[in-house]
Amino acid sequence: MSEIINLSNKIEKQLPTELVSFMQVAGEVAASQGQNLYLVGGVVRDLLLGQTNLDLDLVVEGSAINLAQQLAQIKLGKITTHPRFNTAKLQWDKWSIDLATARSETYAKPGALPIVKPGSLSNDLSRRDFTINTMAIELIPSRYGELIDRYGSIDDLKQGLIRVLHEKSFIDDATRIWRGLRYEQRLYFQLEPNTLQLLIRDIPMLDTISGDRIRHELELILKEKYPENVLYRAEELSVLHRLHPALKGNGWLSNKFKQARQLSHSNLPPVALYLALLAYPLTNEDSEQLISRLRLSKSLAQTLRNTISIKTNLKSLANPELTPSSVHYLLHGYSPTAITANSLACDFPVARQNINLFLNRLRYVKPALNGDDLKRMGISPGPQIKEILKLLHEARLDGKVTSKQGEEDLIKGWLARNR
Ligand code: ATP
């Protein structure tokens, strides 16, 4: 029998006191209900790697909802339950914990969502993607802190390997291909050689995955610290081409992602900006294909369409003679994210200058007078008002007027000429 590893010291050192005492109480309550309780998945992996992760996932052998209800009373917290899968989310103060009933999953057909039944911890661990995500820690008092490692995860963790649990893993669920690349790059690990072979063999299975599920995985990638590394690796293994043959995970993209981060200062850039940069090399037709493959939301689809449309007009924006009002005319109405993507991605320095002028200043310029002011000055309601407001806006943009008085003088001149 292998030696028992107890991680209670690590738990105490690495997790906030509130969460540690919560887990102890949860273990006691579970035991009093005759249930087993475990901490599982990513948080156990990160505990052993010494990395911060406060996303606690608990698995109950029995009923997660029963346990969550009792814990909610103790913590004076709020619970959200999903009776179909017997899962619950418990929230109190600033904390949020997921509790799931151990389940078994079977795949009726590749790519489809699995058939889920209640099961044991072993069932629950055997449905997971990679060995490093299959570790669990006992939480009931008599075994508190003991590590459960059924798949040699500790060795894989030490060697930095991403390994599937069985040969059909990517066939059952090809989103694991993208997940594998994400973990490999995030943790600076390597795909274990046999897993790499299976992954390459099963790349065509990516076509069995719905747009919603692929988009979800892509969004997770774009929320990583360095998404470009995952996309680079995906290009290298021809995974990216399976998403769309015109996508590129090259040095150019890495550069643009870095610039996007510099622009966002301490925050991560929004997913939409990364996606617009990823889609930048595409034609209109390509981007429509990508939009429907990923079933993008209206607003993300609009950002991609705007991005490509501005790119197609870059030559006009690269004219050094353009007045500010013409720059405004060429860019207004487009999504700011699409405009930002073009500022980062375009190759014409003058176009970039004009785009930045728009982003930093022109888009905020507004005339001081409004329609009501114009009516008060004697302009009859109707199309004229719109025309004059446009005139005022252009004059403001081009610096021909700089004050309310200036605008009024401009209108008086216009009235004198047009009466
Ligand atoms: P992390 O990235 O830190 O592991 P995460 O929040 O991205 O966390 P989730 O996507 O929430 O991870 O998944 C939680 C756990 O569920 C993972 O540890 C993994 O074992 C399992 N899991 C998620 N998706 C799959 C999948 N497609 N196939 C098998 N197991 C999965």
Image (cartoon, helix red, strand yellow):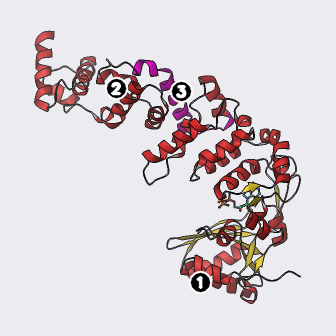
Disc 3, ligand 1: is the CB inside 8 Å? no
Element type where label 3 sits in the image: helix
What residue is pinned by disc 2?
328
Measured Cα–Cα span from mark 1 to mark 2? 58 Å
Residue that appears at 63% across and 23% down: 285
Is residue 2 positioned above or below 134 on the image? below
Q: Which residues are magenta?
A: 293-319
In the image, what residue type sits under mark 3? Ile
Asked if residue 243 can be seen in this view, the reply is yes
User: Which dot marks residue 21?
Assistant: 1
Mark 2 vs ligand 1: CB under 8 Å? no
Give the class, few, some or many, for how many residues have Cα within 10 Å of label 3's Cα (few <14, many ≥20). Answer: many
* Residue located 15% across and 26% down the image: 407
Is 153 included in the stretch rendered in magenta? no
The residue nearer to you, when weighing 75 against 202, is 202
Q: In the image, which is nearer the foreground, mark 3 or mark 1? A: 3
Residue on which the image places disc 3: 308
Q: In this rendering, would 238 be left or right of 269?
A: right
Q: CA distance from mark 3 to mark 1?
A: 52 Å
> Residue 199: x percent and y percent?
81, 47
